[in-house]
Image (cartoon, grey):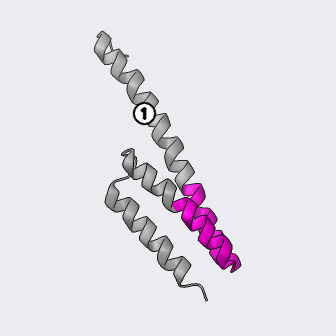
Amino acid sequence: MANIKSAKKRVIVTATKTERNKAIKSRVKTYVKKVYSAIESGDKAAAQEAFRVAETELSKAASKGVYHKNTSSRKIGRLAKAVNAMA
């Protein structure tokens, strides 16, 4: 464990931020899975609605610095492509 007060604070702050980032990433992954499960079931309306929510979550994660903006854009693009490819 750190001895210096500022180092102790950094340990606490890092742990807090790590927990926050994990929660946001987990939330994003959940919504992305919902989109793919809707696509697999063949329900276009549900897939579009799930995509809309997932896109918002990905954008929020990028704006908070959890994901890089290009990573977020790539994931959104791939989801959109998959939803649009549905018959």
Residue at the image position 66 percent from the left and 75 percent from the top: 45
Q: Position of residue 10 (x, y in %)?
A: 34, 22
Residue at the image position 41 percent from the left and 22 percent from the top: 12
Nearer to me, 30 or 49: 49
Asked if 20 appears above or below 79 in the picture, the reply is above
Q: Main secondary structure of the magenta part?
A: helix
Residue at the image position 45 percent from the left and 50 percent from the top: 60
Residue at the image position 46 percent from the left and 41 percent from the top: 21
Is 19 placed left or right of 40 in the picture?
left
In terms of image quadrants, where is residue 78? bottom left
Q: Which residue is mark 1?
A: 17
Is 24 placed left or right of 33 in the picture?
left
- The amino acid sitting under disc 1 is Lys
Span colored in magenta = 29-54
Nearer to me, 29 or 49: 49
Q: Position of residue 70 (x, y in %)?
A: 32, 61
Mark 1, residues whose alpha carbon is within 10 Å: few (<14), some, or many (≥20)?
A: few
Residue that extends furthest to the bottom in the rendered view of this protein: 87
